[in-house]
Image (cartoon, rainbow, N blue to C red):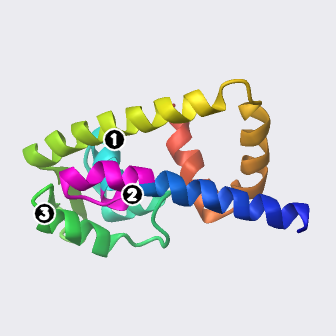
Amino acid sequence: MRRAEHLRFAILAAQREGNRLLARALKPLGITPSQAEVLRLLQQRGPLSLNGIGQLLVCESGSSPSRLVDRVVGLGLVDRRIDAADRRHVEISLTPEGNRVATAVAEVEDDLYAMIDAVAEGHDTDALLGFVHSFVDQLPSGQALALRLEDG
């Protein structure tokens, strides 16, 4: 197997296993990892437009997260508010229940990150991050990640 192929499949395997662990931990909350990402974005950044959410999503592909937002609206976790001054502008924000679930998601994420930190102990994660960034930074997911990293 070529080294590039090995890297591709190793990264894919790590992503899939991380997503499986996250999905399993989120199951009691009744949401998916993609839905959890929307909730956490809204909790961290306050109300956002649909376009604003799309620019920041890393887990979900595509630039229009309307179906994803529709699902969390349907769950009663977020509200859509139409701007009175510009009816084309829709603001998406957490409901009180959405804020409660987003806080629970943060705890799930902290547990996952603690596990990753433990596995990463003794490995050169800076080199790994450098490689991954050189691969994704100019691509849509990398650009979404860059926007997320701007605020720390």
Above/below status of 67 relative to 19: below
Residue beneath the point at 45% across and 65% down = 60
The residue under label 1 is 45
Residue 23 is a magenta residue: yes
Left or right: 75 with respect to 21?
A: left
| Percent of width and height locating residue 103 | 23, 36
Residue sticking out furthest to the top: 122
Quadrant of the rendered structure where residue 140 is?
A: bottom right
Q: Amino acid at mark 2?
A: Gly
Instruction: Mark 2 and mark 3 in contact? Answer it, CB < 8 Å.
Output: no
Above/below status of 85 relative to 65: above
Instruction: Mark 1 and mark 2 in contact? Answer it, CB < 8 Å.
Output: yes
Pick the residue in front: 72 or 21. 21
Give the alpha-carbon distance from disc 1 to disc 2, as whole Å: 10 Å
Q: Residues within 10 Å of mark 3 (few under 14, many from 20)?
A: few
Residue beneath the point at 39% across and 39% down = 109
Above/below status of 147 relative to 124: below
User: Which disc is residue 52 wearing?
Assistant: 2
Q: Earlier in the sequence, mark 2 or mark 3?
A: 2
Q: Earlier in the sequence, mark 1 or mark 3?
A: 1
Label 3 SS: loop
What are the residue bounds of the magenta stretch? 21-35
Q: Residues within 10 Å of mark 1 (few under 14, many from 20)?
A: few
The N terminus lies in quadrant:
bottom right
The residue under label 3 is 75
Residue beneath the point at 48% across and 29% down = 114
Quadrant of the rendered structure where residue 141 is?
A: bottom right
Q: Amino acid at mark 3?
A: Leu
Q: Residues within 10 Å of mark 2 (few under 14, many from 20)?
A: some
Pick the residue in front: 120 or 132. 120
